[in-house]
Image: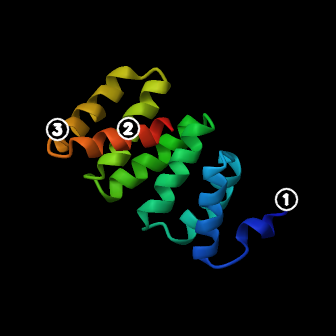
Amino acid sequence: MEDTYYEFGTPADRWDRAQMFFEAKEYLTAARILGGLVQEVPEQVAPRLLLARAYYHSARLGKAETELREVLERNPVEDYARLMLGRTLERQGRQSEADTHLRMVKAMAEDLGPELLAQEQRIQG
């Protein structure tokens, strides 16, 4: 595919396209589209989180970690990004670092209950 395909359309069109590829488990294609979107609108959390998830599922864990740390730098209380960072660090064999983030998520999400479980399932799924 040509680069123009990934750049074609409005940001909303590209967001929809990226979600479609992600849902089809075409994580590398979704990441390629989302990479451009994140550069265009770096302040938006949703494209960066989906990009991190695409990297996570395609085993590009270093890139996932970078995106998640950027989200947390911009919004330290983004519990889903912190949970996902913990899981990403676990997959890299960095358990002590992961534990720090996972403890923070647990403390932040004491009152979330079922929502925390749903977030965990999104990472695994």
Amino acid type shown at disc 1: Met
Q: Is residue 93 left or right of residue 62?
A: left
Image coords of residue 86 (percent x, y): 37, 33
Amino acid type shown at disc 2: Glu
Quadrant of the rendered image containing residue 10: bottom right
Image coords of residue 87 (percent x, y): 41, 32
Q: Secondary structure at mark 2?
A: helix
Image quadrant for the N terminus?
bottom right
Q: In the orientation shown, which residue stands out farthest toward the bottom?
A: 10
**Residue occupying the point 66% across, 49% down:** 24
Dot placed on the residue nearer the N-terminal end, 1 or 2: 1
Dot placed on the residue nearer the N-terminal end, 3 or 2: 3
Q: In the orientation shown, which residue stands out farthest toward the front?
A: 114
Amino acid type shown at disc 3: Ala
Q: Residues within 10 Å of mark 1 (few under 14, many from 20)?
A: few
Q: Residues within 10 Å of mark 2 (few under 14, many from 20)?
A: some
Label 1, on which residue?
A: 1
**Residue occupying the point 37% across, 47% down:** 81
> Label 1 to label 2, Cα distance in Å?
33 Å
Contact, mark 3 vs mark 1 (Cβ under 8 Å): no
> Label 3 to label 2, Cα distance in Å?
15 Å
- In front of the other: 72 or 12: 12
Image coords of residue 117 (percent x, y): 32, 38
Label 3, on which residue?
A: 107
Q: Is residue 20 left or right of residue 117?
A: right
Model colouring: rainbow
- In front of the other: 48 or 74: 48
Image coords of residue 51 (percent x, y): 55, 52
| Disc sitting over residue 71 in the figure | none
